Amino acid sequence: MAPAGLFGLDWSSGTGLIAGGFLGYGRLDADFGGNRGDYRQSDTSFGGFLGWYGERSWVNAQASYTTLDYDVTRDVRMGVAMRRHEGSTDGSNTSFGVNGGYEFGASALRHGPVAGLLWQAIDVDGFAEDKLSTTALAYSDQSVDSLVGSLGWQARYDAGSWEPYVRATWDHEFEDGQEEVFARLQTLPDLEYAVPGVDFDDDFGTLVLGARFDVLGFAADLGARTTVGQGRCQRHRRVRQPRRQLLSAPVPAAGVAPPACGRIDFRSRAGVVQW
């Protein structure tokens, strides 16, 4: 589950041009699966946007910077015994997005095509686990670049006091993911593990459902989003690691959730203005 909230202010020129800024906070609690531990990611974002909205067509651009905080718990099972290691690290996500669309319909129901492009640069600092022992690991810095193009259709209905909407897009990732993620034993710092990175499908779908309404004079937006068809598979390549496998869970790659079939979704903080 990944709840997130965002607050923003905008200014209108009266001729269709809108500019503004926003602040956001989100949290993700995820499980590695197989009783191998879990992690929590929290992120704080700030940014700005600029858009133009005509009678039927619209286009906007957004830029944001996000600070990331990770708390990781890794369980190592050795027969009936179990060791638990914990660690924390920080990171950042710099993103820039462009969206545009066109609407058909002259009544309360409006719908039309949408397209977008989102670039992200994600960095996560290296860190070392606590409780120094033969199973305690240290992780190197990680960096990931992402460029996602989206094409789809959206619809909204003006019901007066509120406005429900739905958007479905086909998305394509143009950048390659991490082929390997590196870690090392703290008791043998010269011995480095190379773990295959989690490989996601380059093509997937995104579905967004929500509603807009007014609360105490402010425009509110409540919704949910999910990705579909973004399966993962392990890369088939040789890695440098000793015969005895001490890693009980994949190393969390920057911007990627190893236990789930989808990326840790920073894009929700970039989608401030979509209409």
Image (cartoon, rainbow, N blue to C red):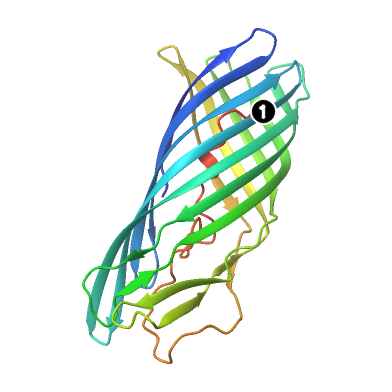
Q: Position of residue 23 (x, y in %)?
A: 44, 30
Left or right placement of residue 264 versus residue 33 in this view: right
- Give me the residue at 35% from left, 59% from top: 39
Asked whether 130 or 39 is in front, the reply is 130
Residue 235 figure quarter: bottom right
For the C terminus, the quadrant is top right
The residue depicted at 29 percent of the width and 75 percent of the height is 136
Q: Is residue 83 above or below residue 201?
A: below
Image location of residue 110, percent across then percent down: 71, 24
Amino acid identity at mark 1: Asn
Element assignment for label 1: strand
**Residue identifier under label 1:** 60
Image quadrant where residue 84 sits:
bottom left
Residue pictured at 38% horizontal, 82% vertical: 190
- Image location of residue 63, percent across then percent down: 57, 34
1 sits to left or right of 114: left
Q: How many marks?
A: 1
On the image, the x and y values in percent for residue 111 come to 73, 28
